[in-house]
Image: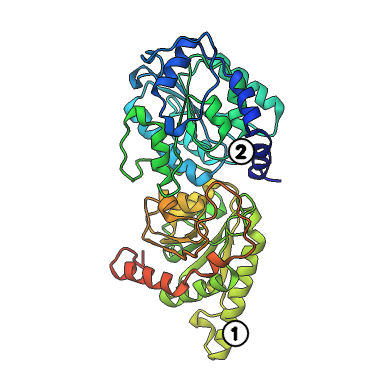
């Protein structure tokens, strides 16, 4: 059972009036801060809060609540899952450290978001932009250790960037937060009883803009572009060397991300017929191109299906048209390669060095956009208004009546209508326009 399903079950058990009142009592705020917080929190994003009867009413906010941006010394940012979303959060952290270099930032995350570790190690070892705290959300021991660490560290601000999970609100209910400004998204009743301030989570607003709202006291730049820079610093190996931009094969490599087994959602894949057609038309448009399929270990079985179907189709086409082997049909060079990378960093190297990446909405799509502006995006179950990457040459959204269905919830859909309706011919026509306008050069 994945973490989202566990959180959904837990939410049903505790996200009700009784538990909201119980956990509200666990929030150990001093009386002045509690009354000050009530005076500055918009009523539209709050429910009524349990207050101590002895708490004096004051309309004047405490000088510590919320803290002024130039008074903030230490921040904890919580992000447990969502590799693509983490890319934009790291961009915000980079802007924050650029404007306020003295702020110390900790990121509480899990092993599910290795991109944090990549950029923590990419920054200066002497002055890293942020420090990592890794937690296992299913470990009670980890919970107790993290609560103790929060209590002992003395953060000025805790920012919870998660939208759905309830495990972090429970953790913060037990933390001593008398001098901490806790901010997050308004998605659960229990959050409204524990957090100091909540922001609306707008599914029609880009996730980057949603995250910026959580950091608005810092008045960061809001332009949609990456200031992050990815530096290749991994050891040489065959998989990385195969995408060395100096090699002729790489100058004609197209990487396809057609499956993303994230959270067990069946919608995160382009159906087999569409995948084979995409490969066929790409070979026709980019004569002699090399097709690579990229995904995680959970995608390899499906990628094998795509590879076998595409190569079978090519062999049959060559035989039917009596084409010689050197034409490209049925030859090893015309085969489809599955890139079995050992790390996210290796995947980023591959994405960086190809001349075109075509990706379904996934973490790899956002990483592709970060390292390579020649990224084309395929949307079906999700909304490009919320997650279209900064750098892209275009996108196609099937936009069936039932989409988007994956905005911080598990869809009960039992078909792939949204992905079936992605028009591959329209996708290729889009890419041809950019190619003809020299946004894509088939000779790199």
Q: Earlier in the sequence, mark 2 or mark 1?
A: 2
> For this view, does 1 lie left or right of residue 226?
right
Lateral position of residue 381 relative to residue 353, left or right? right
Location of residue 27 (image quadrant): top right
Q: In the rendered image, which residue does mark 2 sit on?
A: 111
**Furthest residue toward left:** 437
Q: x and y percent of residue 182 in the render? A: 49, 24
Disc 2 is placed on an element classified as loop
Instruction: Mark yes or no: residue 230 visible.
Output: no
Q: Which residue is mark 1?
A: 316
Q: Position of residue 88 (x, y in %)?
A: 43, 42
Q: Secondary structure at mark 1?
A: helix
Res. 9 in view: yes
Looking at the image, which residue is at 50% across and 76% down? 280
Q: Is residue 368 above or below residue 318?
A: above
Residue 434 lies in quadrant: bottom left
Circle on res. 277: none
């Amino acid at each position: 059972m994945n973490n989202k399903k566990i959180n959904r079950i837990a939410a049903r058990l505790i996200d009700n009036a009784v538990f909201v009142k119980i956990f509200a009592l666990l929030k150990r705020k001093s009386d002045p801060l509690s009354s000050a917080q009530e005076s500055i929190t918009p009523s539209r994003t709050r429910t009524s809060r349990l207050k101590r009867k002895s708490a004096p009413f004051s309309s004047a906010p405490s000088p510590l609540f919320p803290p002024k941006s130039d008074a903030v010394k230490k921040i904890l940012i919580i992000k447990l899952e969502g590799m693509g979303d983490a890319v934009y959060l790291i961009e915000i952290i980079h802007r924050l450290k650029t404007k306020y270099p003295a702020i110390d930032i900790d990121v509480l995350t899990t092993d599910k978001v290795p991109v944090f570790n990549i950029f923590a190690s990419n920054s200066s070892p002497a002055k890293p932009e942020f420090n990592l705290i890794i937690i296992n959300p299913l470990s009670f021991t980890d919970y107790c250790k993290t609560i103790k660490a929060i209590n002992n560290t003395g953060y000025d601000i805790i920012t919870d960037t998660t939208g759905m999970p309830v495990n972090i609100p429970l953790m913060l209910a037990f933390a001593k937060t008398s001098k901490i400004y806790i901010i997050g998204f308004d998605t659960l009743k229990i959050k409204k009883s524990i957090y100091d301030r909540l922001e609306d989570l707008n599914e029609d607003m880009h996730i980057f803009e949603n995250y910026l709202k959580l950091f608005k006291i810092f008045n960061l730049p809001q332009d949609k572009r990456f200031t992050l820079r990815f530096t290749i610093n991994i050891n040489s190996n065959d998989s990385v060397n195969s995408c060395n931009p100096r090699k002729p094969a790489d100058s004609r490599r197209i990487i396809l991300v057609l499956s993303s087994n994230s959270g067990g959602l069946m919608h995160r894949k382009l159906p087999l017929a569409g995948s084979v057609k995409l490969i066929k038309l790409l070979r026709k448009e980019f004569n002699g191109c090399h097709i690579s399929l990229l995904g995680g270990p959970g995608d390899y079985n499906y990628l094998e299906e795509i590879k076998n179907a595409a190569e079978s189709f090519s062999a049959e086409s060559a035989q039917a048209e009596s084409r010689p082997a050197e034409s490209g049909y049925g030859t090893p060079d015309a085969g489809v390669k599955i890139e079995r990378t050992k790390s996210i960093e290796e995947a980023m190297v591959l994405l960086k060095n190809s001349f075109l990446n075509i990706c379904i909405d996934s973490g790899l799509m956002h990483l592709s956009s970060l390292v390579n502006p020649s990224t084309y995006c395929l949307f079906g179950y999700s909304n490009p208004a919320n997650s279209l990457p900064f750098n892209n040459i275009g996108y196609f959204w099937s936009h069936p009546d039932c989409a988007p269905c994956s905005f911080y919830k598990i869809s009960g859909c039992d078909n792939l209508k949204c992905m079936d309706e992605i028009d591959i011919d329209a996708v290729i026509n889009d890419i041809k326009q950019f190619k003809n306008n020299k946004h894509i050069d088939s000779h790199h």
